[in-house]
Each structure stands twice: as C-alpha cells, then as structure tokens.
Image (tube, rainbow, N blue to C red):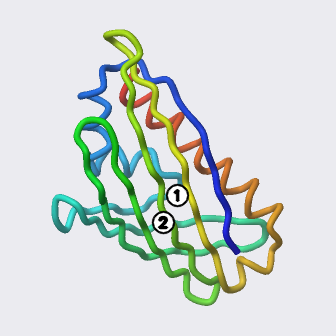
Amino acid sequence: MALVIEGEERITAPVEKVWAALNDPEILKDAIPGCQSLEMKSPTEMAATVVLKIGPIKATFNGEVTLKNLKPPHSYTIQGEGKGGIAGFAKGGADVTLTPDGEDATILKYEAKADVGGKIAQLGSRLITSTSKKLAGQFFSTFGEKVGG
C-alpha cells in the first residue's frame, strides 16, 4: 500500500545550520518518533531501530537509511527500509528541500512516499495515512524545535 505525504516547516535557523542538523544522527534520533538507536555507518548510510504503534499493532523496525542526491546545503533524498518481523515492513523516501527565508530562517519542504506491507497494511489505508502524517508532522516539528530553538 503506497502513500504520499507532503508538508513544510519554517525553522528559525539559517540554511547551513538546518542542513548540518539534517545530517546529524543525534538530532535525527531525537526527532524521529520512537527511534531507539541511529548510528552512522558511512557519511550517507545509517542503521536505525524504531518502535512504532500503529492502531493495535506495536512493532520494532530494524532498518537502513540512505542519503542520496545530495546537493548541500539545499536538498537531498532520504530513503529507508525497515523490517518489523511479523508486523510487516515499511519502506520509502522523502525529498527534502531547504529554502532561505530571510537571513535567519529556512523553509523546509518535504514530499515523502511510503510503502507498507504485511500485517500493518491490513489495518487499512485511512489509519496508515493518518498515522504516517502524524509521525511526519511530529518529526519535522521536533526537528524544527531542536534546530531553531
């Protein structure tokens, strides 16, 4: 089951600072809802463990995150795939774009595409879409607070 999520967040920090944070595993770990661990394996690859509850299903996803199409400090594509055992899998990516908004602020825009399968997919597209939007919103607002706060 595929879905698309779009949004934007205004962050009160210059583009370079936001870009650095988007590549900082400590900040990403704190911003990703349910993230238990996130470690850099290379400058563009990370391993992650995330615990998520979607409806009645709680699952631990072990996955890989890869950064592609890097155009510092303006944009990149973040792709990930996680396996949640019996609960199923989730994979997807997001195109992230940074645009200066004056000298001290940045508009972060994202367009994410995700695909889920297994038991989770049986929960229905409405629940999965609303949960995904909520998680994306939480990530970007927490990220914005950490970087701009």
Which residue appears at 26% of the width and 51% of the height? Answer: 70
Callout 2 environment at 10 Å: few (<14), some (14 to 19), or many (20+)? some
Q: Is residue 77 left or right of residue 82?
A: left
Say which label, 1 or 2, has the lower sequence index: 1
Residue 144 occupies which quadrant of the picture?
A: top left
- x and y, in percent, of residue 86 in the image: 62, 89
Label 1 with label 2: CB-CB less than 8 Å:
yes
What residue is disc 1 on? 34
Q: CA distance from mark 1 to mark 2?
A: 5 Å
- x and y, in percent, of residue 78 in the image: 39, 57
Q: Secondary structure at mark 1?
A: loop
Which residue appears at 76% of the width and 54% of the height? Answer: 130
Q: Looking at the rendered structure, which numbered label has been put on residue 50?
A: 2
Residue type at mark 2? Val
Residue type at mark 1? Gly
Q: Can you say which quadrant of the picture contains the N terminus? A: bottom right
Q: Can you say which quadrant of the picture contains the C terminus? A: top left
Callout 1 environment at 10 Å: few (<14), some (14 to 19), or many (20+)? some
